[in-house]
Structures are given as C-alpha cells and as structure tokens.
Amino acid sequence: MLVLLRVNASALHADQPHHEVSGSCVGLKDNWLAHGVRAVTKRDYYEVLGVDRGADEKALKNAFRRLARRYHPDRSDEPDAEDRFKEIQEAYAVLSDPQKRAQYDRFGHDGPGMGGFGGGGINISDLFGGSDIFSAFFGGGGTSERGRGADMVYHHTVRFEDVMNGSEEQVELDLPTSCLPCEGTGAEGALLDSCDACGGRGVTSRVVQMGPFQTRQDRACSMCNGRGRTPRASCGSCRGRGRVDRSTTLRFNIPPGAEDGTRLRLRGKGEPGRDGQAAGDLFVEIDVAPHAWFERNRNDLIMSLPLGFADLALGTKVTLDHVDGSPLEIIVPRGSSSGETIEIPRRGLPRLRGGGRGDVIVLLKLHMPATLSKSTKRALEDLRKELAPQDLEERIRSEANERRRNG
C-alpha cells in the first residue's frame, strides 16, 4: 500500500530529519504535521468495492470484476479511471487475503502489514482464474471457435395460408462455399507457412503492469488474423478469400402455426470455416404475408364483419372462404348490436408446439350506406319512431351501467 502524502516544500528544511515512510503509519502523524506534511484520507476498502463488510469471496470477486471492467484505463472514458483502477486493485488485494482482511477489519488502514503493495508478485490474471479469462474481459485472447464460419440470416416470405398446414419450401440462393482449388485456405495450392510475427500461435502476448498487478494480455495476431499461418501466395480463384459464391438449392419446412420472426436453423449452411473449421449456420427467418381480411393475435384470427341494420336486427348467416380450405360460417343472432363479437372456436391457426388451434373472432359493425335513395329515406322516416328507444334517458343510464359492469 503506497501512503499518499501532500508535501508543503517550504516547511521542510535541510537540517530537519526526514522520515522514511513504510509499513505502519502509527506514530508519524505528529511528525508529519510538524513538517507541513498531511496524509490524504484513504477510502474504506469495502466502500471502494461497493460491498458490505460481511461479503464473501464470491461477492468480492464479482464486485472487483464489475469495477475493473468499468475503470480499466484502456477501456474507460472516466477522467479518474487510472486512479480508481489502482484503488480498486488495492482494495481487492487486501480483502481477498483472509489474513490481511482480518487485520484491516481490526485496525483499518493503519494496521500492521497494510503497506507495501508496490512490489509486483501479484498477478491480476490469477484473480480471474487465468490470463485467458482476464484477457476476455479486457480485449485479449482468442476463442475456442476461432476460424468457425460466420452465421447468416435469410428472410423468406410465405403465404398466410401456408402457416395453417405448414409447407415444404425450396429456394435457390447464392451462398458462400469453400474454394476448392485452395481448399478454403486462400493460399495458392493450399500452401501455408508459419506466421513469423506470432510463431504460429495465432496470438501475440504482452505483460502489462497495472499498479501493483501484472497480467498477460493475448491478442489475435494482426499479421495472420489469428490463424498462425500465412499464404505463400494468394489463391487466384477466390483472391485469397478462401470462399466463392455458388448457386445452392435449399429445402426446408415451414411448421404449422409459424409466426413472423420464426427462425429455422440450417446447420452448416452458413459461411464456410477457415482452415478446416466448421461452417456457420444459416437461419431462415420467416415473414408471413398479410391476409386479405384476417388480423392475427398469436393463434387467433380477428376480422370485422360489416352488416346492415336489418341483418343485425333479424339475424343472418354469412359464409366465407377460409384459410383451412373449409367454408367459414358466421351465424349472426337476431337482435345483435354493432360492436359485439362472435367467437368461432378452433378455426384459428394451429399452435406452434401443438395443442389444437386458436379461435376466429368476428367483430360486428353496422354498415352505413354512403347515400340513400328517396324511397329509402321515406321508409326510414316511417320507421324512425318505431326504431328509436322509447325512454332515451333510461337507455343512457342502462348503457352506462353496462359499461361499468364490463369495466
């Protein structure tokens, strides 16, 4: 632990003794003040890490990881990132050591053995369980899937009717495939040499000192892009890319009840891998074309049915073509009102994971003609009183009560 001091230079004289500060600060306070030296107050280590005093090893490590990511000098835009990072390192170094933590809990910063954290020997990678884990946090290291081909997404539009019973689809796409002459290496004759920059490892390493800690950071080699090998000469067929586009026939099934955004995975149909690594996957994302009159709510189908006043008052039956291939009969009871709904069970779309079908929900609406003939107007005038509510205020109160009950 480095003791931070602020020195008033004019208060020190050549003939006055100098105190070497190391280890405990106990007993030096009076001498500091006499010589114009003031100690900077250190924050509580538990406060630095944002944990309570009973925090266990896991809580300490999680807090350290979170704060180290935030204040790492190479990553953070915080103006005091470097100082905060050193403070976080120091706090964790003490609290993660059971003996030092016990001393700190008893004596605080002035306890014996709380100083002297400048001496190397502490590898921050060990706190994260190894340099590869630490490098993953701060941008170093590779991945076990280095060289695997990238995944791809293809949007495919199907008819609304196709999601009722499902369908078999076949499409022709130009997809990247491994270049045959260079065997996907990008090198003429597939001839590769070990990379001089990384010695064939695919990564370059450096040891970084961060305050009292040291860590090894591994990064993908920029010369070979992490391959560990470089082509003697670029392949003329693929211009060094290792892949070419070829027309490919794809066959896949649309499951019954598929929704917009449903993705189908075609394994190994994505970009080819590098140097013999596995190819990526191709995801077929389904876009369902809209229906002429149905709206979809998951597995239910919703539609509006405009009817004349006579059809609502006297009742009627309407037959429509339906997406399942069988006619859809809608029976409107007499005395129906605009805004009411009729549910036709189990005539909606199938549920994606089985369990039957949804319903068809029909919203009744009163159709108002844009124009009326003179004879129609006269007929309506004769019916005006008969069709109007007999007690308007009572009807208004009844409608209000109905809204409150359904409310």
Image: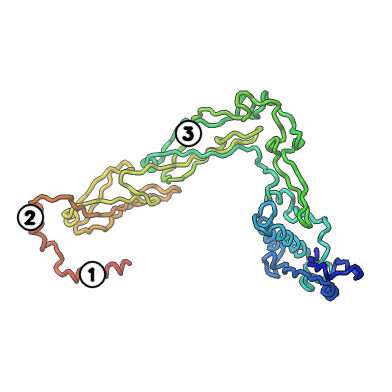
Q: Quadrant of residue 227?
A: top right
Give the number of callouts. Answer: 3
Q: Callout 1 environment at 10 Å: few (<14), some (14 to 19), or many (20+)?
A: few
Q: Quadrant of the C terminus?
A: bottom left
Describe the element under mark 2 as helix, strand or loop. helix
Q: Residues within 10 Å of mark 3 (few under 14, many from 20)?
A: few
- Alpha carbon distance from label 3 to label 2: 64 Å
Q: How far across and down, in percent of the image, does residue 41 sit?
A: 75, 70
- Quarter residue 71 falls in: bottom right
Residue under pointer 1? 398
Q: Closer to the camera, 191 or 315?
A: 191
Whole-percent x, y for residue 221 in the image = 71, 39
On the rendered structure, is 362 left or right of 391? Answer: right
Q: Which picture quadrant has residue 112? A: bottom right
Identify the residue at horizontal 62%, vertical 35% (top origin).
273
Q: Nearer the viewer, mark 2 or mark 1?
A: 2
**Lower sequence index among marks 3 and 2:** 3
The type of residue carrying mark 2 is Arg
Q: Position of residue 128 (x, y in %)?
A: 72, 54
Q: Is there a contact, CB below 8 Å, between mark 3 and mark 1?
A: no
Determine which of the numbered discs, if any, sits on residue 186 in the image: none
Relative horizontal placement of residue 233, taking residue 32 as reference (left or right): left
* In front: label 3 or label 1: 1
> Which percent across, then down, holds residue 374?
8, 51
For label 2, the residue is 378
The N terminus - image quarter: bottom right
Q: Counting residues from the N terminus, which is met first, the one under dot 3 or under dot 1? A: 3
From the viewer's side, name the closer residue of 175 and 167: 175
Q: Which residue is mark 3?
A: 251
Q: Amino acid at mark 1?
A: Ser
Q: Residue at x 45, y 32 (%)?
A: 171
Task: Say what amino acid the circle numbered 3 marks.
Answer: Arg
